Image: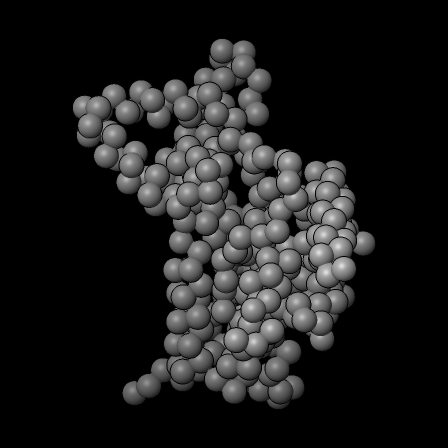
Amino acid sequence: MTVETKLAPIRKGLLEFLVLKIVGARSVYVADILRRLAGTEFATQEGTLYPLLSKLRREDLVLYEWQESDAGPPRKYYRLTEAGKAQLAALDDYWNLINRTIADLGT
Amino acid sequence: MQRISVNVTLNRSTLQFDEAGFQRLEQYLADARRTLEGNPDRDEILADLEQAVADQCARRLAASATTVTLAELQPALEEIGPVQAPGPTLSAPGGASRPLRQISEGAVISGVCQGFARYFGLDVTLLRIAAVLLLFATGGGMILVYLALMLLMPYAPLVRGGQPLRKIPAKSRSFVEFIRAKLGVAAA
């Protein structure tokens, strides 16, 4: 088992956190999120992203509004709700805690 | 005789597909529909995916061409990737718990089972089977329990600009709102 495959479930689980982070930075549509993650270890596809965004919307963490685009049909622009911002802050803190724990254990 | 091309309306766009392309597209969407079985947002996600396929194919179509073939569709579907249900995710301790609410989208009757499934993180099909078994076990008394839950459980907000509700969930939702208004209960 390579390091890559050992950490695959962790990468998968972190996707939601990273999507919240990207949406939290500024209002984005799906292609922006894909571009932001492309080339990182977290590169993903629309087939994964749309169900995830629907789940986040159902949990009241993100919301979207339709905006006209210059090319093609209107797009959904996503942003965080107040609950989404709170959750992102909590996840950020928790992630830092995990990082510190990992660093401490090696010493 | 062979059908040359099929007009397909994908969400807000209409494109022409040849027979092979059309069959591949149908297969992709059927797989997606199956993967999303029991997901209250299924219709919305399928609409998003249809639009993604339409955009990708239109972008790949040569300027002079009008019919989408496998040459355009196959790379488009590879870029979009198969539909994956969101898996378990990192959650911070003490995170906000999910409220217990009825979910009208994708409901069979009013969305009570979907609400419980979301709340407890269970498969909605299991809950529906349990509800039907209870209906028989209680000699129909379960109907009263369901009605009470329908009237008491708040509704989750509807998706803005989403797909219209199916007939029965729409009817039961307006029925519940009517009763709540009569009783002077603030409808959620």
The residue closer to the viewer here, A104 or A36, is: A104
- Picture quadrant where residue A107 is located: bottom right
The answer to whether residue B132 shows anywhere in this view is: yes
Left or right position of B23 against B136: right
Question: Is B145 situated above or below B93?
Answer: above
Residue B177, percent across and down?
49, 23
Left or right position of B43 against A44: left
Q: Residue at x 68, y 54 (%)?
A: A17
- Picture quadrant where residue B21 is located: bottom left
Q: Residue furthest front?
A: A107
Scheme of colours in the image? one colour
Question: Is B107 situated above or below B66?
Answer: above
Q: Residue at x 58, y 86 (%)?
A: B65
Residue B18, percent across and down?
44, 82
The residue closer to the viewer here, A39 or A2, is: A2
Left or right position of B179 against A39: left
The answer to whether residue B51 shows anywhere in this view is: no
The residue closer to the viewer here, B161 or B100, is: B100
Residue A27, percent across and down?
77, 53
Q: Which residue is drawn at 49% across and 12% down?
A: B182
Q: Residue furthest top?
A: B183
Residue B8, percent across and down?
47, 70
Q: Which residue is drawn at 71% across and 57% down?
A: A105
The residue closer to the viewer here, B21 or B141, is: B141
